Image (tube, rainbow, N blue to C red):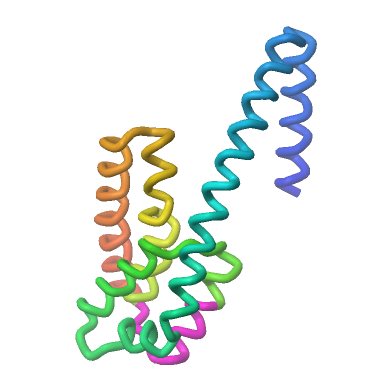
Amino acid sequence: MTIILMIILAAGFLLFSIIKSKKKTVEGLRIARKMLISTFIEVAGVMAIVGLVLAVLPPEVIKQALGGANTALSTFFGALIGTVTIMPAVIAFPLSKSLYVSGAHLVAIAAFLTTLTMVGVATFPIEVKHFGTKFTVIRNSLSFGAALLIALVMGIFL
């Protein structure tokens, strides 16, 4: 339902823009198309590299790192793995359940999930290109710290 509403809103705003200035709207759509193609190629390349790394790294290694005797170290490993990984939530949540069933700590899984969505080392070059190095470093650093804090709070509640 939300997607349908967003499509209707976008179409409405596009129609309003065309009525207001057809020339500017067409130019804006050309720029958007160019940016979409450029970004898609970059993101596809990053996802291919991450996929290769995950294919080489056995799942048992990840499970051992996230379920070790030292919860703090496992949490840090979970945060690092999430930082360098790109995957959609529809894959990340079932993966997290399988990691939990395999013996991973909940706090480590929380760190993995939060850094997965908040920190983007793999997308760093793309972000630098669009937002600049200083902004990217500050955003990723703050996000990494916030993700660890969120994982800690989750550990207290769970």
Residue 132 position (above or below residue 80): above
Give the vertical position of 137 relative to 130 (above or below).
below
Please provide percent x and percent y for residue 37.
63, 39
Q: Position of residue 109 (x, y in %)?
A: 39, 75
Q: Residue at x 63, y 29 (%)?
A: 32
Q: Give coordinates of residue 138: x percent, y percent.
A: 26, 42
Asked if residue 156 is positioned above or below residue 39 in the image, the reply reads below
Horizontally, residue 95 falls left or right of residue 36, namely: left
Residue 36: percent from left, percent from top: 62, 37
Q: Principal SS element in the magenta part?
A: helix
Q: Is residue 36 left or right of residue 78?
A: right
Residue name at image x 39 percent, y 45 percent: 125
Question: Which residues are drawn in magenta?
Answer: 95-106
* Res 65 quadrant in image: bottom left
Residue at 26% of width from left, 48% of height from top?
A: 142
Q: Nearer the viewer, residue 90 or 48?
A: 48
> Up-down: is 39 above or below 78?
above
